């Protein structure tokens, strides 16, 4: 109980500090996040609408261009216009073109030109008294340069914008001149405001205008304007009666500083966000700017409401804190009494747990020792099982080869005796002087075939008891190089990796030559007689992987023959040492199927063994293990 009296439960302090440090930062974070996300979204919307203004202006220009082009196409095909232009009869041409102009005059089409090949004006249908001057505008130059229709917005000397479409005039495939229609663009902003809900101002830099002509243009077109409204620009078109005064600090900025600029200005009770867009003519020349303003008064009100909501939430949270404080004071008193009752029980359980833990540790130690012994026993058992499986497989293969060897040996001895008689008779027959050349040739072929058959019987004898090797001391390197040099074609090479202190081997030289011959021959075939064979000779201790006949032989001379040919499919690897198994063409001399079986039989009788590692498409490595010879 003394321990309990010194204990202090700081529930209220811990709980309220944790709640305050968790709730208030979250409240502030979400409030600021909502504020800035809403602000970012609105600015992104304004930027999108600014780009939309530029796209809509371009789109309207394309629509007007297509309309004017369709009209010009109709005029080009008028035979009367063609005839009058080709005859250079200006009165006749004016007579035939005037009805067309009167028809389109109500469509805001104010310019109708017929232009010669040298780009001089032959007839202004809208002003027939004026002709002969050079029409050297950008659209006319482009139509003459490309031979195709050219269109674009161009500013006239009076400060008006005209959409001009110039079409080359071809008659029977020959260019005779150009036809141009022009439509004055009187209001760029009205339709855009209806679509986007933005206030727009179109400004033209004064350096592109002559004040006298501009004022004359106002009188001619019935427009209004104030040259002195801004010192650098005149306002060509607008949707508001006047520019917000706060815009003045942005208007004098260089054009580069205005690209991508977003500003906020106030006018009356309204707040606007906006930016600048370049105003370009058909050749891409910047004539001025388009100022786009978006009313953001409602959005700013929403942000104010968001801030008020955050502040109100903070006040409510303080009230909730007070209620929780009162509740936790009562709860803390109850916990003090409960803690006193639990303390004694906890001490009792702690002593019992220590005793239980000691017993568990002792039991765990015993289980761990027993588990270790079981694992060791199991590992030894698994190793013994694998060794027995391997020994069984080797024994089965040896018994199978021995059975085949007995049969093959008997057949080979009898067949060899018959071949001896056949060869003797062939030799006697060739001694006859009365034989013709053809007969001698046939006897020679028969003799060659018989000798090849005799060679085959020698291979079969290898499987019988008559193939027991006569072992002696063999220099592996000298024997291997001699066989390779005799067998390898000129199209192939061989590299050697010989251990410096290589042991001598105990082997039958003749049989070992046959094994190496078969393996090198197989490597050449696998590589289509092209490339390089790698041969390695090294000393090898092989205590852990002895075969049935190696109970006393632990040291071997290893010969590895590696090729990078076609390789052996994985499914065929268990069968490659079976007699007469071959993937070669059995109809040719290449595929007897005895080479690897003979090699396996010879190595087994030498108390050695053969191993192969192969991957289809990458090559094979055959390794021969021969008992090493040491002086007693």
Image: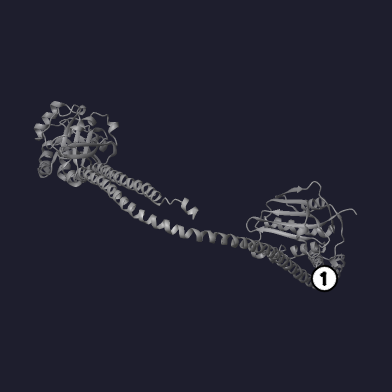
Residue 414 seen in render: yes
Q: Which residue is mark 1?
A: 409
Q: Position of residue 203 (x, y in %)?
A: 19, 33
User: Foreground: 60 or 349?
Assistant: 349
**Left or right relative to 609: residue 59:** left
Which image quarter is the C terminus in? bottom right
Q: Position of residue 401 (x, y in %)?
A: 77, 69
Q: Image height check: is 392 above or below 38?
A: below
Q: How many marks?
A: 1
Q: Position of residue 236 (x, y in %)?
A: 16, 34
Residue 100 seen in render: no
User: Foreground: 422 or 546?
Assistant: 546
Q: Image height check: is 248 above or below 528?
A: above
**Left or right relative to 252: residue 361:** right
User: Foreground: 526 or 569?
Assistant: 569
Q: Image height check: is 111 above or below 429?
A: above
Q: Residue furthest front?
A: 2
Q: Residue furthest right?
A: 632
Q: Which corner quadrant of the image does residue 132 belong to?
A: top left
**Left or right relative to 620: residue 555:** right
Q: Check disc 1: other Cα within 10 Å, few if <14, some if 14-19, many if 20+.
A: many
Name the colour scheme: one colour
**Left or right relative to 230: residue 437:** right
Q: Which corner quadrant of the image does residue 339 belong to?
A: bottom left
Q: Position of residue 386 (x, y in %)?
A: 71, 66
Q: Image height check: is 172 above or below 144?
A: below
User: Foreground: 586 or 462?
Assistant: 462
Q: Which corner quadrant of the image does residue 237 belong to?
A: top left
Circle 1 — which element? helix
């Amino acid at each position: 109980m003394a321990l309990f009296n010194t204990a202090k439960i700081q529930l209220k302090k811990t709980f309220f500090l944790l709640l305050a440090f968790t709730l208030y930062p979250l409240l502030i974070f979400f409030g600021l996040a909502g504020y800035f996300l809403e602000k970012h979204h609105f600015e992104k919307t304004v930027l999108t609408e600014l780009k939309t203004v530029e796209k809509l202006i371009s789109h309207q220009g394309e629509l007007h261009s297509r309309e004017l082009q369709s009209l010009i196409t109709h005029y080009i095909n008028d035979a009367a216009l063609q005839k009058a232009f080709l005859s250079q009869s200006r009165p006749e041409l004016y007579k035939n073109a005037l009805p067309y102009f009167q028809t389109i005059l109500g469509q805001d089409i104010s310019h109708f030109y017929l232009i010669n090949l040298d780009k001089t004006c032959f007839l202004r249908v809208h002003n027939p008294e004026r002709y002969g001057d050079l029409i050297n505008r950008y659209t006319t130059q482009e139509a003459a340069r490309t031979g195709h229709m050219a269109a674009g917005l161009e500013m006239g000397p009076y400060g008006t914008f005209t959409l001009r479409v110039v079409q080359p005039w071809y008659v029977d495939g020959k260019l005779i001149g150009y036809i141009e229609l022009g439509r004055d663009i009187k209001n760029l902003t009205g339709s855009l405001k209806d679509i986007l809900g933005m206030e727009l101002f179109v400004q033209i830099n004064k350096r592109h205008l002559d004040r006298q002509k501009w004022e004359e243009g106002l009188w001619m077109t019935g427009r209004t304007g104030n040259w002195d409204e801004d010192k650098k620009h005149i306002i060509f078109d607008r949707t508001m009666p006047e520019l917000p005064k706060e815009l003045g600090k942005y208007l004098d900025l260089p054009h580069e500083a205005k690209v991508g600029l977003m500003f906020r200005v106030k006018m009356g009770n309204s707040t606007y966000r906006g930016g600048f867009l370049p105003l370009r003519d058909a050749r891409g020349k910047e004539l001025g700017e388009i100022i786009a303003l978006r009313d953001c008064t409602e959005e700013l009100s929403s942000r104010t409401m968001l801030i008020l909501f955050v502040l109100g939430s903070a006040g409510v949270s303080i009230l909730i804190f007070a209620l929780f404080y009162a509740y936790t004071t009562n709860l803390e008193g109850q916990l003090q009494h409960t803690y006193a009752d639990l303390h004694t029980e906890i001490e009792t359980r702690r002593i019992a747990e220590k005793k239980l833990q000691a017993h568990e540790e002792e039991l765990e130690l015993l289980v761990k020792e027993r588990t270790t012994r079981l694992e060791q026993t199991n590992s030894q058992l698994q190793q013994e099982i694998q060794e027995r499986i391997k020994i069984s497989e080797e024994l089965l293969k040896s018994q199978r080869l021995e059975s085949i060897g007995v049969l093959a040996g008997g057949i080979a001895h009898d067949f060899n005796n018959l071949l001896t008689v056949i060869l003797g008779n062939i030799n006697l027959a060739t001694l006859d002087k009365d034989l013709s050349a053809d007969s001698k040739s046939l006897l020679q072929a028969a003799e060659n075939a018989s000798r090849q058959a005799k060679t085959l019987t020698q291979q079969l004898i290898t499987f019988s008891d008559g193939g027991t090797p006569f072992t002696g001391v063999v220099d592996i390197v000298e024997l291997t190089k001699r066989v390779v040099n005799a067998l390898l074609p000129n199209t192939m090479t061989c590299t050697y990796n010989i251990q410096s202190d290589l042991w001598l081997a105990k082997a039958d030289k003749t049989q070992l030559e046959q094994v190496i011959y078969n393996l090198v021959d197989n490597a050449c075939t696998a590589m289509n007689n092209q490339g390089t064979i790698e041969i390695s000779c090294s000393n090898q201790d092989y205590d852990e992987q002895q075969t049935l006949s190696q109970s006393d032989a632990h040291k071997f001379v290893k010969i590895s023959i590696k090729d990078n040919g076609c390789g052996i499919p994985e499914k065929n690897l268990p069968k490659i040492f079976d007699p007469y198994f071959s993937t070669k063409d059995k109809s040719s001399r290449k595929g007897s199927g005895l080479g690897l079986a003979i090699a396996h039989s010879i190595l087994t009788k030498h108390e050695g063994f053969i191993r192969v590692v192969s991957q289809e498409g990458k090559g094979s490595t055959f390794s021969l293990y021969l008992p090493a010879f040491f002086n007693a």
